[in-house]
Image: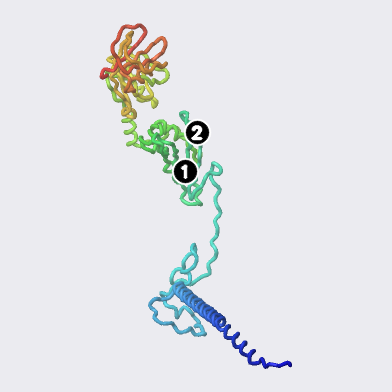
Amino acid sequence: MLVRHNTKLLEQAIDLQVKRSAIPTLQAEAAAHDKIARANAFRRMATGAAIAVAAVGIGVGAWLVFDRDPSMTQLEPPVAQTQPSNPSENQPKDAKKSEDRIPDGETIAEEGKTDKPKSPPIEQPTLPPAAPANPDTFDFVKFANRQVTYAGITWQLESGHHFASEKDPTWNTAWCYTRRLANTGVEVQVSLVNRPSPTSKPQAPVSSIETLASVGLDDNSARELASRCLWLDKASFAPSDFDMGQERKQAAALAEELSVQDGWDAIGNDLPGMPAWNVSFEQCRAQCEADSRCLALTYDKKHSACFMKNTGSILVRSPDAVMAAKKAIQANLQYSSLVFAKDTVVVGEGYANVRSSYADCIMACGADQRCLGFNFDGPNKMCAMLDSVTSSSPFKGVTSGIKANRS
């Protein structure tokens, strides 16, 4: 026999159990939605605050930009729509005009004058450059450049011409200079000549004697170099055309004077064509002072011979000689204690044996502290230097020298 059971209550019980098990999941979902809602609300609040701050900043900036009278403590009432027949009647005398804020380069309107519309500035035509063609131009200065070779050296000469204005067809002052590495390795600008006006006498040289000497020039060679400068008016000058000025002339005269020392001989560095025979010492001295190449001399009293030199270094004792040197090289002179003997050889320890001239052999030993003596073999042009000397003996054809203060 089949029995039919009523399962409705069982189904309701199962359904209730399923709903109870889903409660934790629903609670978690509800908490997540609540957090999302709170985050969105906070983001909207932050965005609103940022917009508010930006608005305040824009307002402050706009207030600073507009020309506002700081004495006003409250807003002015709105201006009536009907304008008076003469707007300037109600305008304060010290009120600022709108031209105070016009772009740079425009003219600011003066107080008390009627405002007028401003026309754009008229561009003036540029005058064609003077000769030579296409000179370099900077502001109101035009340059003419020239490269020349003097004393075996290439020099870049730059001539500047200053104009009073861009429209002035004639320059008012001009100058010429060059640049050169000094013996210290530093580039030096050497001013050669100034022209105060196109018609005045040019002045040269301009740089000091010390500056000229640092690049291998003196007053004479600087004037020679200045005579080769290029000018826009095509003017040309000889070295004798330049005005040195009284002070510079006196300084140049002192620099050209020779300091004389009797009983000393300046070895080597003779100018071409030396010696000059059958001349007096005064003639030798005057000739050296007049020659820019001559910086020192040795006069042989016994043979009336003049040896002009382009420099001086080693001085040795000689009773028949008179030495003289210009101021430019006096600091370079070295007084040697070498004593000489003809047809004599000195004995000792040699450390160098080279081919040279007799003058070069003397200068080499005189400048070397190690050298205490030397032997020069005239027929073979050989120089032997010794760092110790023990004795000497006759030897034909050999000229020797020993230092009197040797240890």
Quarter holding the N terminus? Answer: bottom right
Q: Position of residue 94 (x, y in %)?
A: 41, 74
In the displayed orientation, state which residue is furthest to the front.
Answer: 1
Q: Position of residue 57 (x, y in %)?
A: 46, 74
Residue at (39, 20) in percent of width and height: 270
Out of 332 and 254, give the one closest to the viewer.
332
Question: What is the three-letter code of the residue carrying label 2?
Answer: Val
Mark 1 and 2 residues: CB-CB less than 8 Å, in contact? no
Q: Is residue 36 left or right of residue 188?
A: right
- Above-or-below relation of 94 to 346: below
- Above-or-below relation of 403 to 195: above
| Quarter assignment of residue 4 | bottom right
Of pointers 1 and 2, the one earlier in the residue sequence: 2
Out of 160 and 335, give the one closest to the viewer.
335
Question: What is the three-letter code of the residue carrying label 1?
Answer: Gly
- Above-or-below relation of 107 to 373: below
Please tell me how crowded label 1 is: few (under 14), some (14-19), or many (20+) other residues with Cα within 10 Å: many
Residue 8 image label: none
In the displayed orientation, state which residue is furthest to the right.
Answer: 1
Q: Position of residue 164 (x, y in %)?
A: 46, 50
| Quarter assignment of residue 200 | top left
Q: Which residue is mark 1?
A: 160
Q: Which residue is mark 2?
A: 148
